[in-house]
Image (cartoon, rainbow, N blue to C red):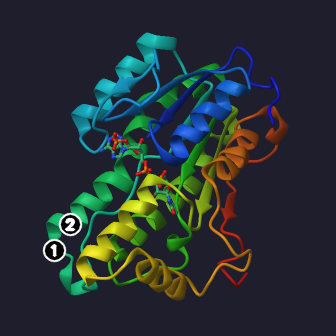
Amino acid sequence: MSSNDLDGRFAVVAGGSKGLGLATARRLRGAGAAVVTIARTPPETADPLFVRADLSTPEGASAAAAAVTERGGVPDVLVHVTGGSRAPAGGYAALDDHLWQEELGLNLLPAVRLDRALVPGMVARGSGAVVHVTSIQRRMPLHDSTLAYAAAKSALATYSKGLANEVAPRGVRVNSVAPGFIRTDGAEHLLARRMSEGGITREAALGDLMQVLGGIPLGRPAEPEEVAELIAFLVSDRASAVTAAEYIVDGGTIRTL
Ligand SMILES: NC(=O)c1ccc[n+]([C@@H]2O[C@H](COP(=O)([O-])OP(=O)(O)OC[C@H]3O[C@@H](n4cnc5c(N)ncnc54)[C@H](OP(=O)(O)O)[C@@H]3O)[C@@H](O)[C@H]2O)c1
């Protein structure tokens, strides 16, 4: 399902080489946008506008912003998908300063740095749409191995709201999307880590994850394309009055208001 509502637009998807980011880049291209993707490794299928950068470092983010500007000028659309968790199991006590820095460096600071470089051009032009991908863990933190990740996503959601309030009067819309369990490489890596740390099968690791989530009322994880569909709506003119909002895509996992 696609429309041409992004014809002629220039879009950037940070973390666009795999999983949700790849699905988002494909969806935005399908709607007519020219899309730059940024990641440390190129996507499997050729992507002429790909930018290789490590967004967890200030140098990587600033080189990526320069490459984006060189490829297409000021973006119309900026989607921050970069993120994930590499911390071990063991609860809060297993998270030393280095791990905290890593989780904040991957889940909060890439968006902060890229926005600081690219949003001023949108503000000067008076138009643009930004989406930050957070996680339901920002409202429902799982403490066994992803507490620092959850806290970083929470900070990202707070930052997103504040930025949205600041730039709305200048014509730039900023929203956040909080996914639950999505079937991606990133989710498979999380399961693989639980398997090796617990010496358990994939089925058992998946069962444990479902248990801590309290199940998914819809009965299944989301496909990356289902989350990409929401992002494509938010960055299009169809969402022209939507800003400073958070959308949850979790099949009903969060049971509370
Ligand atoms: N999957 C889920 O169940 C789930 C649930 C809630 C929230 N989320 C969030 O949704 C987003 C996407 O998740 P996903 O499962 O699609 O992840 P994924 O499959 O691991 O893909 C992550 C993307 O970010 C890039 N990336 C990772 N580290 C990077 C770095 N240092 N610099 C530049 N790019 C980097 C990856 O490419 P390279 O590795 O080549 O750099 C890849 O393109 C993340 O923010 C995640 O926290 C996912």
Of residues 73 and 251, which is closer to you in this image? 251
Relative image position of residue 8 (x, y in whole percent):
70, 14
Q: Secondary structure at mark 1?
A: loop
Residue at the image point whose x is 51% and y is 71% from the top? 138
Q: Residues within 10 Å of mark 2 (few under 14, many from 20)?
A: some
User: Eyeballing the image, is 147 above or below 120?
Assistant: below
Of residues 224 and 45, which is closer to you in this image? 45
Q: Quick check: is the Cβ at mark 1 less than 8 Å away from ligand 1?
A: no
User: Eyeballing the image, is 156 above or below 111?
Assistant: below
Q: Is residue 243 left or right of residue 69?
A: right
* Labels 1 & 2 near each other (Cβ < 8 A): yes
Q: In the rendered image, is residue 128 in sight?
A: no
State the mark number for residue 99. Answer: 2
Kind of residue indicated by mark 1 = Asp
Q: Quick check: is the Cβ at mark 2 less than 8 Å away from ligand 1?
A: no
Q: Secondary structure at mark 2?
A: helix
Rendered image quadrant of residue 87: bottom left
Q: In the rendered image, is residue 188 in sight?
A: yes
Rendered image quadrant of residue 238: top right
Q: Is residue 125 left or right of residue 188?
A: right
- Which residue is label 1 attached to? 96
Rendered image quadrant of residue 161: bottom right
Kind of residue indicated by mark 2 = Leu
Q: Residues within 10 Å of mark 1 (few under 14, many from 20)?
A: few
Of residues 242 and 256, which is closer to you in this image? 256
Relative image position of residue 181 (x, y in whole percent):
56, 67
Residue at the image point whose x is 49% and y is 84% from the top? 207
Q: Is residue 112 left or right of residue 25?
A: left
